[in-house]
Amino acid sequence: MPNNIKTILTRFQQRNPNPKLELYYTNHFTLLIAILMSARMTDKGVNKVTQCLFDQIKTPQDVIEMGIDKLTDALKTIGLYKTKAKHIVLLSEILVRQYQGQTPTTHEELTALPGVGRKTANVFLNETTHAATLGVDTHVFRVSHRLGLSTGKTPEAVEKDLLAIIPQEYFPMAPHWFVLHGRYICKSQNPKCSSCFLNDICPYYQNLNTQMCG
């Protein structure tokens, strides 16, 4: 186990004791839809659509009544919008037919729905049930590697590494901390290393300094 994980999590908690998911949603169903829509999109870009869309869509039945054509048009500023609209309609039909319009809360049931992969299910469960799950997006992947917490080559491998070292008491906050750190500080391009509160224990930053000094 990396011996700095407690230090990292403690510093995250001191700076942001109540981190929040930045996606806009109104209930469990709209949360699932918002997470699905966020693939290869920024939360800000998704929120621009959902702020209006979720006034019209609150249940799976609402989606069915809206229909694929109107939904597709509503999502046209979202990446892969045609595929996502199709998945949302199919997902909604299954929820009405098999779950009486309710959104399931088990990983197996969620990942059986169209368009819902492992990451989407993990984010949903962490947010709704406070389960010790962690959706590994590009931010989590990058931060965990730079901090030396994982060398995993796939999101699943990184997820496994992080779940093995993050104590239970740091959920559901931990996934938010990693995402927000990657989004605002440990960015892919031009990371804010010099002002980062973890730079004294960050292998990535120490390696940068070594290269510059060399």
Image: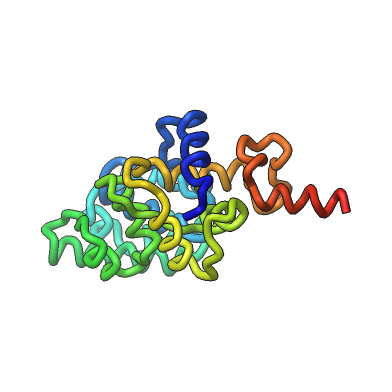
Q: Is residue 183 above or below residue 15?
A: below
Which quadrant is the C terminus positioned in? bottom right
Locate residue 118, reporting x and y percent: 36, 65
Pick the residue in front: 103 or 187.
187
Q: Is residue 171 above or below residue 125?
A: above
Residue at 43% from the left image edge and 69% from the top image edge: 83
| Horizontal side, residue 49 vs residue 62: left or right | right
Residue at 21% from the left image edge and 60% from the top image edge: 106
Residue at 52% from the left image edge and 41% from the top image edge: 8
Locate residue 171, reporting x and y percent: 35, 44
Q: Is residue 150 above or below residue 34?
A: below
Pick the residue in front: 126 or 164.
164
Residue at 36% from the left image edge and 46% from the top image edge: 167
| Horizontal side, residue 117 vs residue 29: left or right | right
Pick the residue in front: 84 or 6.
6
Q: Quadrant of residue 184?
A: top right
**Residue 77, can we see it?**
no
